[in-house]
Amino acid sequence: MLTADWRPTAAMIQLRERAQILGEIRTFFAERDVWEVETPLLSAAATTDPNLASLSTVYAGQHYYLHTSPEFPMKRLLAAGSGAIYQLCRVFRDDERGRRHHPEFTLLEWYRPGYDENQLMGEIESLLRSLAQGRRPLGPGQRLTYQQAFQRHAGLNPHTATVVECAQLATKQGIQIADLGPDIDLWLDLLMSEVVTPQLGRDGPVFITDFPASQSALARLKPGTPVVAARFELFLAGMELANGFHELTDAAEQRRRFVADNTKRRAQGQPEMPMDERFLAALAAGLPDCAGVALGVDRLLMALLGQPCIDGVLSFPIEIS
């Protein structure tokens, strides 16, 4: 009889570095008077985002969902007058496992009342450079629009591209995938992941800004043509590390987007998700003008510590949990 492997997948030196970095994150925010909060992992509501799948459980006969992000309860705290806050917590996403994915992972999320997305990107870069000291060299930061990134690394204008053009580019790049159908955003997500992202952040942090409005369910929109959102993503070492917004504060518009999400879910054969009515009530009561971001801590550790697989920064991945 074989003995089950009980040892951690990450080396002890990596786990010690993980502990040190978590402490440095907390020090960074303490020095800036951003206070740490805790919110529930379980909620009666769930994300309606068609790109995310929630894990669920049952308590006292009622379904609850393990959160994919602490965003909604944190925004309830903001509406109640908390001021600047952050949270380091475990989050859960179904059907996500791979070299850079794990169904349970650590997220750092924070919100800055009075900030727009540009000010928040500056703070993120400050945090990144602080944590990188003595661990890995970081070159100059870059900011590119979504359109600039696609044109530079894929030779495609994402705002005018057709499904046929995207499919042709995918074939040319040797990407093996079934037909994604008529939804242009699914094709753009594929090309962003497989073609653009690997080219980003090889030497220093790269922020991609001005995402299409159709890919920004929680961000406010910018005036102009094409319509883009005040959303950004951070990339380092060919990985997406963070996703942030100048936050939408209009409760009626947010409800419309949740309904549109569930309509899309139905069309794709996915289950509809219960909308978070308490979050919508908080928006209606008055969310302060703010910017917020969610940063994947495990991927950040991979980038800082030179680990090619997420298992190298985790103690016990799901297969040996």
Image: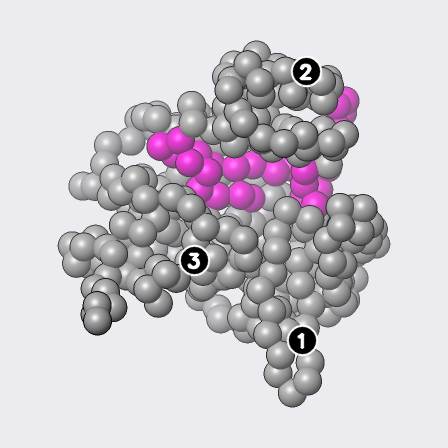
Q: Which residue is drawn at 60% across and 60% down?
A: 54
Q: Could you tell which of marks 3 and 2 lies nearer the N-terminus?
A: 3
Q: What element carries label 3?
A: strand
Name the residue carrying label 1: 63
Q: Could you tell which of marks 3 and 1 lies nearer the N-terminus?
A: 1
Task: State left or right for residue 289 relative to residue 19.
Answer: right
Name the residue carrying label 3: 105
Q: What element carries label 1?
A: strand
Q: What element carries label 2?
A: helix
Q: Residue at x 62, y 83 (%)?
A: 59
**Separation of disc 3 and disc 2 at Cα?**
35 Å
Name the residue carrying label 2: 165
Task: State left or right for residue 315 relative to residue 276.
Answer: left
Give the residue at the far front of this rendering. 1
Identified by mark 3, the residue type is: Phe
**In the image, is residue 92 part of the stretch drawn in magenta?**
no
Q: How is the image coloured?
A: one colour
Q: Magenta segment, which residues?
A: 215-244
Identified by mark 1, the residue type is: His
Q: Which of 57 and 242 is in front in this view?
A: 57
**Separation of disc 3 and disc 1 at Cα?**
22 Å
Q: Position of residue 189 (x, y in %)?
A: 60, 33
Q: Where is residue 217 in the image (x, y as percent from the top left)?
A: 70, 45
